[in-house]
Image (cartoon, rainbow, N blue to C red):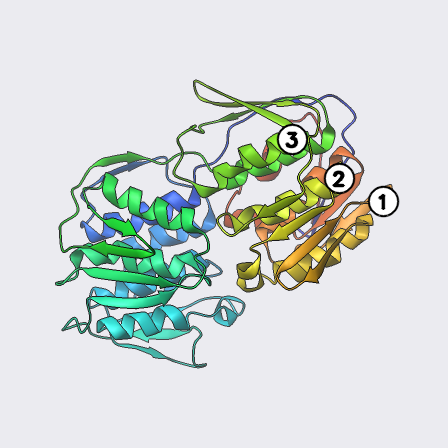
Amino acid sequence: MKSIDLPKLESAIKVKIPLPSSKSESNRVLIIDALTSGKNHLSNLAEARDTQTMIRLLAEDPDTYDVLDAGTTMRFLTAYAALNNKRKTLTGTSRMCERPIGILVDALREIGAEVKYLKNEGFPPLQTGGFVNQKAAGISIRGDVSSQYISALLMNAPLLPRGLSLHLTGKVGSRTYITMTLELMKTFGVDYEFEDNKITIAPQPYQPTSFSVESDWSGASYWFSLLACAGAGEIFLSGLKADSLQGDARIVAIMDHLGVKSTFRDGGVALQAQPVRGLADFDFSDCPDLAQTVAVTCALTGQQTAFRGLESLRIKETDRIAALQKELAKIGAGLEEKQPGIFTLIPAEKIPESVEIDTYDDHRMAMAFMPLMARTKVRILEPEVVNKSYPSFWKHCELLGIRPAYNH
């Protein structure tokens, strides 16, 4: 599919969205399940391509783990293979092989795993060798690059002969994702200590259990944004919990400032439009995947907002800061780095009658700009990128009563 045309919404929003399951939770419990030889009962796993890739690779156990464009899958499987004495080649798409992995590999080598690069130092493809002796039970690792490196190590830590202590140096980003990993491990019987940026896990077995994956808060964020941009209506999002482990549940508090009231009920959360209270400043360090969603929302609701904690966006599926700057400009909005590390979101001045959005092989670019249809006609290029995390996204848009035009 080359593009999808979304008509401008003309009727009031009143819809129930059957959200997909969380990719973040699914990929973590799949690694834990592999570490317990598949003795758990897992249900409601994500339909996301990243998760389905993980399921397939763990089930087939090929000599080469080709993760396609799945960053989480690459990082989690690298640690899993390296620390469990599996000789594997790990590779992916050309973009995947441009995404750094050196910090994780350095940590694995320090622990005692054998990992070598097959092409460019610090990047996939790579090859894991043997793991015979644990050289270190305590290591330091940067906390300001990717929490997935840390989560990848943590999930394997209980089965290491000496356990593992991680000292997180510098500013710790995406802390909520680290906490999610630890709490999921606790669900499967593993105790941990997390104090003063030091995480300690003693050698111990996982306890097989039953686990049902929650709906995806990242996927929910686009529907919050649509309602905020429309300024009227009601949406019910199924399968979400008030006590979620997912860091992107912070969208509830963010959107409370941008025009959306949330009420948790049995089976999910009800959204209602309310007056915009304003959002002057927000730090995305703990929820970087929400930045694109909130940028578009602020642009359409007239909020000049300071964005902080965007460091990791440069190494995602694309350089998300550059991509946002280019696409926001098409609606007369901007994202300007006026101080080092602080970006000012300049709201849209005059939205054109129609707009075409490039997606840069990034699922979140496609979904974050969908809410533009609350104000104008939108063409999204390469819309199939949503398959990475939310394959049913465009079908769910049809529940709004619109008829998207699919252009092949």
- Which amino acid is tagged 1? Glu
What residue appears at the point 29 percent right and 60 percent down from the top-left corner? 153
Secondary structure beneath disc 1? loop
Secondary structure beneath disc 3? helix
Q: Which mark is residue 300?
A: 2
Residue 14, image x and y in percent?
A: 65, 20
What residue appears at the point 48 percent right and 71 percent down from the top-left corner? 97
Q: Which residue is the site of mark 1?
A: 349
Tag 2: Cα neighbours inside 10 Å, few (<14), some, or many (≥20)?
A: many
Q: Nearer the viewer, residue 157 or 389?
A: 157
Does 134 sit above or below residue 354?
below
Q: Is residue 329 left or right of residue 324?
A: right
- Which amino acid is tagged 3? Glu
Q: Which mark is residue 236?
A: none
Q: Which residue is the site of mark 3?
A: 398
Tag 3: Cα neighbours inside 10 Å, few (<14), some, or many (≥20)?
A: few
Residue 80, image x and y in percent?
A: 27, 61
Residue 287, image x and y in percent?
A: 51, 47
Query: How much space separates mark 3 and mark 1, taking CA atoms?
Result: 29 Å
